[in-house]
Image (cartoon, helix red, strand yellow):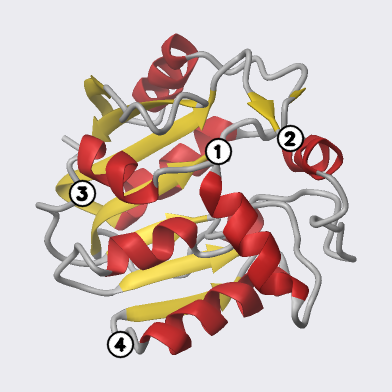
């Protein structure tokens, strides 16, 4: 999986956990004092606020489902921009703990963080209960269309899905991340198979050269 390559690329700040083989959040971080170091290093690779603005998150109302919250990099920025509740989900217990810690430290009241294998069991929310969803760095999985269908299920009509993924030639800590094959055209095709409509490709900020992005919509 892609995040195992992230672990080896970034170095020993990032450590694997005993979570199941499939990983849908960011690379895992060790507990204790090193959490802050890992989070700071990871955040330095991503302009979270700029990416969310480019995707239009800043004008989104209602609840948001984040499929794979990782360190909470986007959770925090999203919670500061949406009018409803951010439901931040991850399969990795250390990622969930890291995100809960960041949310508590900032005193955010509109975030619910949950450990959940949403690929296997869904996001746990009622159909048509959310206005937006984030699928960031996560669609290189066995059944990407199934995950996009779950986003479609939980969204209201007109709900938006923000997608970003690593560029093919991405480098982390000056080391290449190999075999990243997902291209925007493939993602768009998967979204359409899941019943979503392509809205636009998102021009991401200059501070995020490692990613491409797009916006999909539930008709």
Residue, disc 4: 109
Specify whether 215 is left or right of 164: left
The local secondary structure at tag 1 comes to loop
Q: Considering depth in this image, is 198 or 137 the residue closer to the camera?
A: 137
Which comes sooner in the sequence, label 1 or label 4?
Answer: 4
Residue, disc 2: 2
Residue at the image position 64 percent from the left and 71 percent from the top: 36
Which comes sooner in the sequence, label 1 or label 2?
Answer: 2
Q: Are dots 2 and 3 in contact, CB under 8 Å?
A: no
The local secondary structure at tag 4 comes to loop
Residue, disc 1: 137
Which comes sooner in the sequence, label 4 or label 3?
Answer: 3
Vertical placement of residue 5 versus 110, above or below:
above
Residue at the image position 29 percent from the left and 69 percent from the top: 79
Dot label at residue 57: 3
Q: CA distance from mark 1 to mark 3?
A: 17 Å
Specify whether 100 is left or right of 163: right
Q: CA distance from mark 1 to mark 4?
A: 26 Å
Q: Position of residue 12 (x, y in %)?
A: 88, 53
Vertical placement of residue 217 versus 36, above or below:
above
Q: Are dots 1 and 2 in contact, CB under 8 Å?
A: yes
Q: Position of residue 39 (x, y in %)?
A: 61, 62
The local secondary structure at tag 2 comes to helix
Residue at the image position 16 percent from the left and 35 percent from the top: 219
């Amino acid at each position: 999986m892609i995040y195992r390559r992230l672990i080896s690329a970034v170095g020993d700040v990032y450590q694997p956990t005993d979570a199941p083989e499939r990983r849908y959040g960011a690379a895992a971080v060790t507990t204790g004092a090193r959490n802050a170091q890992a989070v700071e290093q990871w955040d330095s690779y991503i302009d979270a606020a700029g990416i969310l603005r480019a995707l239009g998150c800043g004008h989104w109302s209602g609840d948001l489902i984040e499929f794979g919250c990782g360190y909470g990099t986007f959770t925090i920025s999203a919670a500061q921009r949406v009018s409803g509740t951010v439901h931040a989900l991850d399969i990795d217990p250390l990622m969930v703990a890291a995100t809960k810690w960041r949310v508590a430290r900032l005193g955010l009241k509109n975030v619910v963080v949950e450990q959940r294998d949403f690929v296997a069991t869904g996001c746990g929310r009622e159909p048509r209960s959310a206005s937006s969803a984030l699928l960031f760095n996560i669609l290189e999985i066995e059944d990407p269309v199934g995950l996009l269908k779950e986003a479609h299920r939980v969204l209201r009509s007109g709900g938006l899905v923000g997608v970003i993924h690593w560029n093919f030639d991405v480098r982390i800590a000056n080391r290449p991340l190999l075999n990243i094959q997902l291209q925007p055209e493939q993602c768009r095709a998967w979204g359409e198979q899941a019943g979503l409509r392509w809205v636009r490709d998102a021009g991401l900020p200059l501070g995020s050269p490692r990613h491409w992005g797009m916006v999909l919509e539930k008709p």
